[in-house]
Image (cartoon, grey):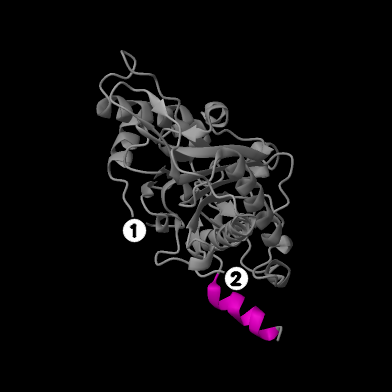
Amino acid sequence: MYPSGPVDGITDVPGVRVANLTKIEGANIRTGATAILPNADPWNHKVSAAAQPFNGNGEMTGVQWVNESGYLETPIVLTDTLDVGRADDGVISWMMQRYAQIGLEDDVPLPVVAECDDQGMNDIRGRYVQADDVVALLSRAQGGQFARGNSGAGTGMRSFKFKAGIGSASRVLPAAQGGYTVGVLVNNNTSSAPRQFLRIGGYPIGERMRNELLPTPKRTSLEPETGRKNGGSIVIIVATNAPLESRQLAALTRRAELAMGRVGMPSPISSGDLLLAFSTTYTFDRDAQWNIHAPRGSFVEDETIVDALYVAAIEATESAIYDSLFSAQTMTSPYGTTYYALPAARVREIIAGMH
């Protein structure tokens, strides 16, 4: 319904910055981290935000304070499950380098770090993402285009028995509706979603490819088929330059959840499906004495514009999930199992054959 921005990614929202740390080494290391910054200085220019789980078998740190305060004041880092602590350490180190009074006269940060379990593609026990890696990652985050698929936190991701990873997309409202942009970034690890559930643009792609490009060879005894690893996860980050307060942003995350159903993700009980949305223009600014001031401008109250933002969030999330599949590349796990990329040409062929 709405066009994408020039990057067709979350960085189409002005001020948003992204960076990836990708670690692919030898046969065992297939992991990384992805950073999203709402602006260059979130500690002093906190952005309105809200977070919520769709299914809670996963971790996103710091969100109790996000929801209590109504704002986001740190970078967001995505990584693998066993590196959450190290990523958190890296965010704190980066912030202490930038803000010398943290823990003295200034307050202390509660970083937002979200995880997906990449043990099916990575020797996760090695915990290869270090705090220093995250410090460097945050320092090079920037706007514009960025790598997707087998990049950053998406390096070891799988979905619908295909290789998956980082995906992103955006939608831009017409000038008559404010001209606002909604951008989405996902880390898609919905590995337990049955292949036949996958739908693209409403077409039953997974059913038509039910027996095509399945992981080979089949799962070994070293790859358990139960527990969190088999459940899968998806982390969805929604950004907009529409001035929205936290209650509205919580509603925006609920609309992003609808895109999961459109793609065919069932969100089983063992899945960690976590969402956070923020507005870059509804900010809580600090003065030189560290006093936090409530946003001075008004938030969007026109219901027709809010409804349009809801639609844009659904569309951008759906597109970002597709991007996480189409941008990924075939990869072999430490256990010798190869997960294949979803070939766009085959998808186009299936769709053409249905007309």
Amino acid type, residue under disc 1 in the picture: Gly
- Up-down relation of residue 257 to residue 222 (above or below): below
Question: In screen coordinates, is 59 left or right of 265?
Answer: left
- The answer to whether mark 1 and mark 2 are in CB contact below 8 A is no
Q: Where is residue 291 shown, x and y percent of the image?
A: 37, 23
Amino acid type, residue under disc 2 in the picture: Met
Q: CA distance from mark 1 to mark 2?
A: 23 Å
Residue 347, magenta (yes or no): yes
Q: Where is residue 79 shown, x and y percent of the image?
A: 47, 39
Q: Where is residue 264 shown, x and y percent of the image?
A: 71, 59
- Up-down relation of residue 92 to residue 39 (above or below): above
The residues colored magenta run 343-353
Main structural element of the magenta stretch: helix, strand or loop? helix
- Image quadrant for the N terminus? bottom right
Q: Nearer the viewer, residue 204 or 12?
A: 12
The dot on residue 1 is: 2
- The earlier-in-sequence mark between 1 and 2 is 2
The dot on residue 144 is: 1
**Residue 118 visible at all:** yes
Q: Secondary structure at mark 2?
A: loop
Location of residue 100 by image quarter: top left
The dot on residue 190 is: none
* Mark 2 crowdedness (10 Å alpha carbons): few <14, some 14-19, many ≥20: few
At a point 71% along the width and 83% down the height, the residue shown is 354
